[in-house]
Image (tube, helix red, strand yellow):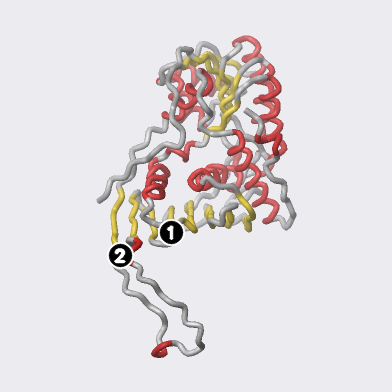
Amino acid sequence: MTCLRFTPVRKRISEMRKTLRCAVAGAGRIAWGFHLPQICMREGFELAAVADPDRQRLEEVKHAFHPAAVFTDLETMLREVHPDLTVIASPTIFHKEQALLAFRYGSDVFCDKPVGLNPKEASAMYGEAKRLGRKLMAYQPHRINSEGLTARAILQSGRLGRLYLIERHISNYVRRNDWQAFSGNGGGMLLNYGSHYIDQLLYLTHDTAARVKCELRRVITCGDADDLVKAMITTKHGILLELDINQATAYPLPEWRICGVRGSAVYSNRQWNIRYCEPDALPPVRADHTLAAAGRRYPSEQIEWKEENIPCIPADPGLYYDYCRDYFAGNGMPFVLPEETLEVVRTIELCRRDAEGQEFSSPVTEHMLQVT
């Protein structure tokens, strides 16, 4: 069993003094399970207000998290509370409208993924943030989950050699019947789960999408949005990223398979296993250009493989709020850069257009990349 260390891409900046007064838009799953608890327990944050049109949910929030105030209307909350940071944890169809409203009331925005329904919405959000001198960052938790951190450490170790393929499989059997089952709500696995895993794959490879092939299907969902995604993304540097999201399978596939020219890594049942060979373990081999295979045999090699079990690096999901404090209360870089978020949204659109048989070749343009 081998222990690997993860070297972060960006160092945190921790010289902050300001306490961020936070307002949360939405009191549903992600707010209840993550944002509200983290705001309450992390140093440097104050839960100033929560807005949700459901009064019953607001009562539950009051008893569980004790915000200073609750509102059934977001604009009223923004006007009366003037928060430093608005956390948008509402359904996707409201993200753009609510973010723009928060900016106009002088608040920065921490927005759940996906930031917008499409590239046009996401660009408008970052453009308005820049125009009004506000900050916007997306929530992409899979960047710092345990198996993702370990995958990065495996790649950084160089054991596998040059990377050429990552397969990511998300397998379940769920007949979705909630709001995410309906396309009119911004539902579907490509937009919702795909936002997580496309970001994770592009973040791991430090790359962007050059072209995609994608199939979307409705299999057992109760709604009209996709519950099966099969996407092949070829990156600018030629790495193949295969994303398989299947909400209609009784048998799961291994969650990860990473392939390099000298070895592979597989993650399944909360365990990473790698098999690789040292560079000098592969003797030179010559191509045989004749049409007569030597000895009438198929080529084969005896390779001295090394195998290791890699324990997952412990993860702290709440670390995301430390990154938020670095950025929103200090002078740190955003943990998720604007151009990274825009690239994820663009790649999702590429996938959707390919699945629908439509062309879409818009790159992340210069005016997008200049947003800070």
Q: Quadrant of the C terminus?
A: top right
Q: Local crowd at mark 2 within 10 Å, few (<14), some, or many (≥20)?
A: few
* Numbered badge on residue 305: 2
In-image side of 307 versus 162 (left or right): left
Q: Is residue 228 visible?
A: no
Give the percent coordinates (x, y) of residue 190.
Answer: 60, 48
Whether the residues at callouts 1 and 2 have beta carbons within 8 Å, the answer is: no
Label 1 Cα crowd, 10 Å radius (few <14 / some 14-19 / many 20+): some
Regarding mark 2 in the picture, which secondary structure is present there? loop
Q: Is residue 18 visible?
A: yes
Is 127 rendered above or below residue 3?
A: above
Q: Is residue 37 above or below residue 295?
A: above
Query: Which badge, 1 or 2, is on the more N-terminal residue?
Result: 1
Q: What type is the residue that disc 1 sits on?
A: Gly
The front one of 19 and 252 is 19
Disc 1 is placed on an element classified as strand
The image quadrant that residue 4 belongs to is top left
Closer to the camera in the image, 204 or 46: 204
In the depicted structure, whether residue 92 falls above or below residue 48: below
205 relative position to 352: left or right = left
Give the CA separation, mark 1 to mark 2: 14 Å
Residue 58's x, y, as percent? 54, 20
Numbered disc total:
2
Does residue 261 appear left or right of residue 273 in this picture?
A: right
Q: Quadrant of residue 369?
A: top right
**Relative depth, front residue between 277 and 58:** 277
At label 2, the amino acid type is Trp
Which numbered tag is attached to residue 260?
Answer: 1
Q: Residue at x 63, y 21 (%)?
A: 134
Residue at 64 percent of width and 52 percent of height = 351
